Image: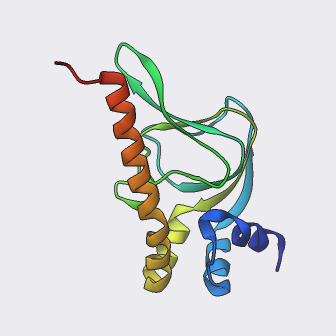
Amino acid sequence: MEGLERIVKEHVFFADLTDDFCKLVCGCAKNVRFEAGDYLFREGDPADQLYVIREGRVAMELSAPGHGSMTFQTVGEGEIVGISWLIPPYRWTYDAKALERIRAISIDATCIRRKCEDDHDLGYELMKRFVPVIIERLHATRLQMLDVYGTKS
């Protein structure tokens, strides 16, 4: 197995992915690095990549009027950043900022969407991996909001 295929296959997000599906994903993937302070993407820009974090931590930030940027979640090794590529209009809905050096796999969104459309089994396999991430992020955001706003008597 070549380098990128081995890295993808060993990443927790792609655990138990078949060799054929792994090759399809790797056809859209490349290794990338970001330095601390770099932005992986900015709110409003085209959501044209998915990032699978291999090393480092990424802050997901929202801009709030009168408050500037606020981190609503931090993710790290073994996690993914960027779900907006899944749903039209394919625009980022938050910023993603490297808190330290990031090593990641970048997956071209147009490429992987096309492959999922061509092979619905691949699409289903990937959706089974994304849905738990989406649910976990919703729960984490809910808890963050409860912490920030609390309950008033």
Of the 4 image quadrants, the one containing the N terminus is bottom right
Left/right of residue 132 with respect to residue 51 in the rendered view: left
Q: Residue at x 47, y 23 (%)?
A: 69
What sort of colour scheme is used for the picture?
rainbow
Please tell me in which quadrant of the rendered image residue 151 appears: top left
Q: Quadrant of the C terminus?
A: top left
Percent x, y for residue 82? 51, 51
Residue 112: x %, y % from top left: 53, 70
User: Residue at the spot x=51%, y=65% of the render?
Assistant: 110
- Most extreme residue toward the top is 66
Q: Residue 55: where, in percent of width, then height?
A: 74, 48
Query: Which residue is farthest right?
Result: 2
Q: Identify whether 152 is placed above or below 135.
A: above
Q: Is residue 151 above or below residue 97?
A: above
Q: Nearer the viewer, residue 126 or 84?
A: 126
> Where's residue 2, x and y in %?
83, 76
Task: Pick whichever, 46 or 33, lies toward us.
Answer: 33
Q: Is residue 135 above or below residue 21?
A: above
Q: How many marks?
A: 0
Residue 106 in the figure: left or right of residue 125: right
Determine the residue positioned at 44% across, 61% down.
132
Q: What residue is rendered at 46% in x and 85% in y?
A: 121
Left/right of residue 106 with respect to residue 115 in the rendered view? right
Residue furthest left in the image:
153
In the shown orientation, is residue 78 left or right of residue 148?
Answer: right
